Amino acid sequence: MTLPTDPAENLAALIRCASVTPAEGGALTALETMLKPLGFLVDRPVFSEDGTPDIENLYARRSGNGPHLMFAGHTDVVPVGDEAAWTHPPFAAEIANGEMYGRGAVDMKGGIACFIAAVARHVEANGGPKGSVSLLITGDEEGPAINGTVKLLEWAASRGEKWDASVVGEPTNPDALGDMIKVGRRGSMSGAVTVNGRQGHVAYPLLADNPVRG
């Protein structure tokens, strides 16, 4: 049995899947093919919501006694635009000058391909990690992002899944691709802000109370 130890081969298989949001495009099937020989149990829940397309996602776990490491990512990609403007076809995974070209190579099929290769090499050399390893992969990151990560996390948690740490393979690259590892990452926060002031005419600002300028 051949294990998916080569990240370049893994990446090529994923790039060749035209997984433009919301299409699965064969990408999750390719992942399942890689993961099952490594001892992962694979689920592919589909989430729906009115006004949005149904999205297929993937959760895979290889269980062990010890801490639980989860890799989070997405296989969907943005549209290719004018394909004639591409130097290399977007879904051909062509290699030129030692670099692989294709839609999603960086964001973020490359990270997924490398993570699977790392697990495969560990399994091949050591028989598998002592703890648990899981992959939480959505097909709805580049689109509305409604039927993806949040629902997949809730689905997994409802089944008793708990994680000790998570790795997200989105690259951080101030100088070269993937040359930096971040502990934590920026997020988002929504809120309501109430300000008080006194309206006035722009010609008479001294008679108004502008809460923005103070």
Image (tube, rainbow, N blue to C red):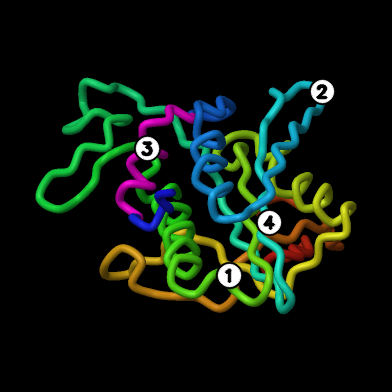
What is the spatial separation of the Cα atoms under label 3 and label 4, in whole angstroms? 23 Å
Left or right: 86 in relation to 55: left
Q: Is residue 180 above or below residue 112?
A: below
Q: Nearer the viewer, residue 72 or 160?
A: 160
In the image, residue 121 lies at what x, y percent? 42, 66
**Residue for badge 4:** 61
**Residue for badge 2:** 50
Instruction: Single out the mark in the foreground, 3 or 2.
Output: 3
User: Which of disc 4 and disc 3 is earlier in sequence?
Assistant: 3
What is the spatial separation of the Cα atoms under label 2 and label 1, in whole angstroms? 31 Å
Q: Secondary structure at mark 4?
A: strand
User: How crowded is the residue under tag 2: few (<14 C-alpha within 10 Å), some, or many (20+)?
Assistant: few
What is the spatial separation of the Cα atoms under label 2 and label 4, in whole angstroms? 30 Å
Instruction: Single out the mark in the foreground, 1 or 4.
Output: 4
User: How crowded is the residue under tag 1: few (<14 C-alpha within 10 Å), some, or many (20+)?
Assistant: few
Instruction: Single out the mark in the foreground, 1 or 3.
Output: 3
User: How crowded is the residue under tag 3: few (<14 C-alpha within 10 Å), some, or many (20+)?
Assistant: many
Q: Secondary structure at mark 3?
A: helix
Q: Amino acid at mark 1?
A: Arg
In the image, residue 106 lies at what x, y percent? 37, 50
Q: Amino acid at mark 3?
A: Ile
User: Which of disc 3 and disc 1 is earlier in sequence?
Assistant: 3
User: Which of disc 2 and disc 3 is earlier in sequence?
Assistant: 3
Q: Nearer the viewer, residue 27 or 144?
A: 27
**Residue for badge 3:** 15
The region drawn magenta spans: 7-19
User: Which of disc 1 and disc 2 is earlier in sequence?
Assistant: 2
Q: Amino acid at mark 4?
A: Arg
Overall secondary structure of the magenta stretch? helix
In the image, residue 42 lies at what x, y percent? 67, 45
**Residue for badge 1:** 185
